[in-house]
Image: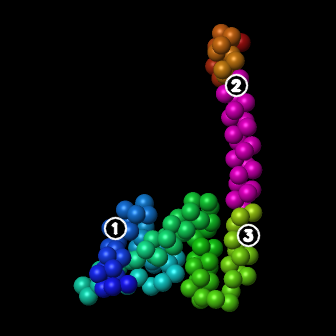
Amino acid sequence: MTTGDAAAAEMSIGEVAARTGLSVDALRFYERQELLVSAVRRSAGGRRIYDQEDVEWLRICTRLRASGMPLAELRAFAALVREGPGNEEQRLDLLRRHRENVRGQLADLRECLDLITWKVGVYERHLSEGTAGGVWDPTASQRGV
C-alpha cells in the first residue's frame, strides 16, 4: 500500500459513524467498553483514526448486538479476538451459545407472528362479514351486553 493509499484508508470518527450507522457517541462507548479488536489510533492532533478493518469489525459488533448478544459476551468475544490465534474453540463456543439464544428468540417471534396472523384473520373476517362491532369490545360489559 502506498502512503496515499494508507491516508485514503484512514477515516475520522464521523466517517465511521456514517459507514456503520452508529453515532459518534456510540463509537466512543464501544471504545470505552473495549469492544474493538484493535486500539483506535490517534492523529498528531489527538483525533481518532479508523480503518476499513475497524468498520468491518464494528459491523459484526452491531449485528451481534442487534441479535441480542449482551455487552459482556461481546466484550469477551472481542477480548478473545484481540488475543489472537489459539482460542478459536472458545470463540466458537461463545458464538454457538449465542446462536442457540437467537434460535430461541426466533421461535418465540414465530409464535408471536402466528398469533398476530391469526388475529389479523379474525378481524379481516369480521370486517368482511360486517360483524366487527362486537369483537373484543371492552365496553360491552358496561352496556350490559
* Circle nearer the N terminus (3, 2): 3
Q: Nearer the viewer, residue 129 or 11?
A: 11
Snapshot quadrant of residue 8 = bottom left
What residue do we see at 30% from left, 85% from top?
Answer: 3
Q: CA distance from mark 1 to mark 3?
A: 33 Å
* Residue 22: in magenta span: no
Please state, as top left, top right, bottom left or bottom right, where the C terminus lies in the image: top right
Residue visible at 67% across and 27% down in the picture: 120
Q: Quadrant of the N terminus?
A: bottom left
Q: Most extreme residue toward the top, as rendered? A: 130
Q: Earlier in the sequence, mark 1 or mark 2?
A: 1
Q: Amino acid at mark 3?
A: Arg
Q: Is residue 52 left or right of residue 101?
A: left
When the figure is inspected, residue 127 is found, relative to residue 33, above or below; the finding is above
Question: According to the image, label 1 marks what residue?
Answer: 15
Whether 125 is drawn above or below 10: the answer is above
Which residue does the image show at 74% across and 43% down from the upper left? 111
Instruction: From the image, state whether disc 1 or disc 2 is nearer to you.
Output: 1
Q: Is residue 70 above or below residue 31?
A: above
Residue stretch rendered in magenta on the structure: 101-122
